[in-house]
């Protein structure tokens, strides 16, 4: 169990952002598990995905559910907190205590809302680097994360290669495909089409863009699952009824399930944060700071790396993950790759996948032993 | 201590590899050869393995391994990235031995390739006398369940190298744990070596 901690960073010097502008004295909310050893060489930075947060292995304060990676991080888990010091920060732009659109802008005492600057994955990583500096860690033993978390891992390998001993990017890509961008745009338009969004200024209103955010979540949720998983879980089964209603109520179980996913999501997530973070993902291209060359982007990387993909993930498919492996191979890096067979789709990295756990555990422990 | 007296065929292979070389073992199994070479030759090793259970074993040993297929995934490596590539007992199970061999000599300065010799006298005898596909310690599968697609003899291999303009530098005799310079086809090798083992290269 870990207490949520909040630290103010960039107190002396502002954090300059890719899109121009800067953030100064921004807050980062984070959790830690385990103890940093005397050599300070046992830290693992866990990067969360789009709607994740710092509650990686402790109960979520709003949903009261287990941490999103509680099967992976904890005592005697694949990332063993008896051995490792695990750090998980909420990204900037997020809504669980790190500076983002729903936090107060110190310049005018009001919520940032859409005055918050558009940020990038690289900006998030620069912000995380300030946290790592603050914690007194010169070299992180391992940086890991899935989906957007994987993008953060890649950006760490590119921006601060000397600070990363090893890395496990999971179910991710070097940039967002047109299909990825399209799905995010659908989500954003859904939020912005909700009249309660009010151009982002809904924080003091009793009307919040819950419908828009809920539909955004429903659309995204479909992309996290595979066709096979949806079919085997729900098929055409009806929800608490024996025959069709000939109405627009939730006749099918899948409809009811998605509505529930959307409905519960709005309690824990801020609509403006959803806009900003999906935008950061769409802008992500780890080669962009290097004239589009992935080789250039990673040429200083010396880390030991394990890339993981899942067979039924169509959002960040094996082919995208193999592109990353190919670049690392071209550079002669110590890279491993494993493709986990599962029908659970993109969400697999958050689910009970024993072979995935075994791979992470084997890689991390053997890498630590050979440190 | 001579490495040649060590377990299995590893010693013979280790004799061919200088200290600190970079090595890729294609079809690396559970990574034990790479581990052996890391221990005795301090190599910088990589593996490729198609069987995920074995990939997991490699990961747990700290061996960098790609879950991949020799037929399709060697293209990902740039020219002469490695000092040595190793392909032990895998050539006959690839879809295209010719392409795999071309890829091996492309991605590494030298390649070590071993395969079961279908020209061995016992195999010839089995076919000749019993009219049955041979099953032995080295060829342990029945014809209907074998993963082996392309059996060849030592002489076939030598011919293919010639066709591909691949230079054979050394040959190994695993039963006698002996290495020697290659000087053309040899009646004794092709009849009496159960396994062909060669060090090859192409500039």
Image (spheres, coloured by chain):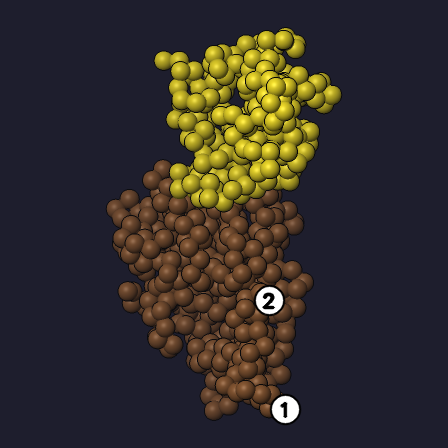
State left or right for residue B34 relative to residue A296. Answer: left
State left or right for residue A130 relative to residue A325. Answer: left
Numbered mark located on residue A227 in the image:
2
- Do badges 2 and 1 share one subunit? yes
Q: Colour of chain B?
A: yellow
- For the residue carrying disc 1, how many other residues have a C-alpha within 10 Å: few (<14), some (14-19), or many (20+)? few
Q: Quadrant of the C terminus of chain B?
A: top right
Q: Quadrant of the N terminus of chain B?
A: top left
Q: Would you say residue B21 is visible in this rendering?
A: yes
- Tell me the CA gap for discs 2 and 1: 25 Å
Circle 1 residue? A246
Q: What residue do we see at 45% from left, 30% from top? A: B34
> Which chain, by letter, is brown?
A
User: Residue B166's x, y, as percent?
Assistant: 68, 20
- In the depicted view, which residue is nearer to us: A195 or A16? A195
Q: Are marks 2 and 1 in contact (CB under 8 Å)?
A: no
Residue A95 falls in which quadrant of the image?
bottom left
- In the depicted view, which residue is nearer to us: A15 or A152? A152
Q: What residue do we see at 56% from left, 18% from top? A: B122
Sequence-wise, which precedes: disc 2 or disc 1? 2
- For the residue carrying disc 2, how many other residues have a C-alpha within 10 Å: few (<14), some (14-19), or many (20+)? some
Q: Would you say residue B165 is visible in this rendering?
A: no
- In the depicted view, which residue is nearer to us: B80 or A246? A246
Q: What residue do we see at 62% from left, 83% from top? A: A193
Q: What residue do we see at 54% from left, 41% from top? A: B50
């Amino acid at each position: 169990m870990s207490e949520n901690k909040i630290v103010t960073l960039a107190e002396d010097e502002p954090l300059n952002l890719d899109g121009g502008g800067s953030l100064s004295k921004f807050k980062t909310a984070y959790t830690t598990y385990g103890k940093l050893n005397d050599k300070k060489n046992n830290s693992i930075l866990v990067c969360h995905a789009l709607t994740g947060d710092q509650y990686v292995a402790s109960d979520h304060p709003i949903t009261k559910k287990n941490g999103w990676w509680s099967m992976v991080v904890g005592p005697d888990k694949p990332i063993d907190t008896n051995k490792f010091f695990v750090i998980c920060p909420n990204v900037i732009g997020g809504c669980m205590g790190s500076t983002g659109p729903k936090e107060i802008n110190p310049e005018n005492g009001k919520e940032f809302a859409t005055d918050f600057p558009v940020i990038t994955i690289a900006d998030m990583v620069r912000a995380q680097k300030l946290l790592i500096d603050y914690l007194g860690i010169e070299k992180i033993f391992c940086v890991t994360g899935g989906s957007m978390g994987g993008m953060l891992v890649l950006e760490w390998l590119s921006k601060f290669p000397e600070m990363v001993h090893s890395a496990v990017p999971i179910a991710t890509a070097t940039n967002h495909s047109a299909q990825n961008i399209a799905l995010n745009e659908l989500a954003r338009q859904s939020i912005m089409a909700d009249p309660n969004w009010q151009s982002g200024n809904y924080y003091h209103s009793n009307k919040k863009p819950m419908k828009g955010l809920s539909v955004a979540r429903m659309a995204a949720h479909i992309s996290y699952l595979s066709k096979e998983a949806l079919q085997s879980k729900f098929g055409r089964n009806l929800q608490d009824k024996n025959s069709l209603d000939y109405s627009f109520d939730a006749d099918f179980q899948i409809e009811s399930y998605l509505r529930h996913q959307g409905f519960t999501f709005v309690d824990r997530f801020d609509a403006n944060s959803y806009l900003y973070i999906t935008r950061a993902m769409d802008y992500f291209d780890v080669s962009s700071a290097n004239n589009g060359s992935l080789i250039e982007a990673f040429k200083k990387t010396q880390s030991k790396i394990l890339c993981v993909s899942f067979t039924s993930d169509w959002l960040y498919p094996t082919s995208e993950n193999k592109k990353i492996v190919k670049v690392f191979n071209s550079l002669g890096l110590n890279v491993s790759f494993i493709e986990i067979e599962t029908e659970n789709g993109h969400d697999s990295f958050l689910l009970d996948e024993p072979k995935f756990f075994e791979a992470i555990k084997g890689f991390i422990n053997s890498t630590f032993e050979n440190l | 201590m001579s490495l040649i007296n060590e377990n299995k065929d590893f010693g013979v292979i280790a004799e061919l590899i200088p200290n600190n070389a970079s090595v890729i073992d294609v079809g690396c199994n559970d990574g034990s050869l790479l581990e052996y070479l890391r221990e005795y030759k301090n190599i910088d090793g990589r593996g490729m393995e198609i069987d995920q259970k074995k990939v997991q074993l490699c990961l747990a040993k700290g061996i960098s391994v790609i879950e991949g297929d020799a037929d399709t995934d060697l293209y990902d490596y740039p020219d002469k990235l490695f000092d040595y590539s190793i392909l032990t007992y895998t050539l006959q199970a690839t879809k295209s031995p010719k392409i795999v061999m071309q890829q091996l000599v492309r991605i590494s300065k030298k390649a070590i390739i071993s395969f079961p010799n279908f020209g061995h006298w016992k195999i010839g005898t089995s076919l000749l006398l019993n009219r049955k596909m041979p099953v032995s310690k080295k060829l342990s599968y029945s014809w209907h369940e074998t993963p082996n697609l392309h059996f060849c003899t030592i002489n076939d291999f030598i011919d293919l190298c010639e066709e591909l303009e691949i230079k054979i530098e050394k040959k190994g005799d695993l039963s006698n744990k002996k290495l020697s310079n290659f000087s053309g086809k040899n009646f004794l090798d092709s009849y009496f070596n159960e396994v062909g083992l060669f060090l090859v290269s192409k500039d």
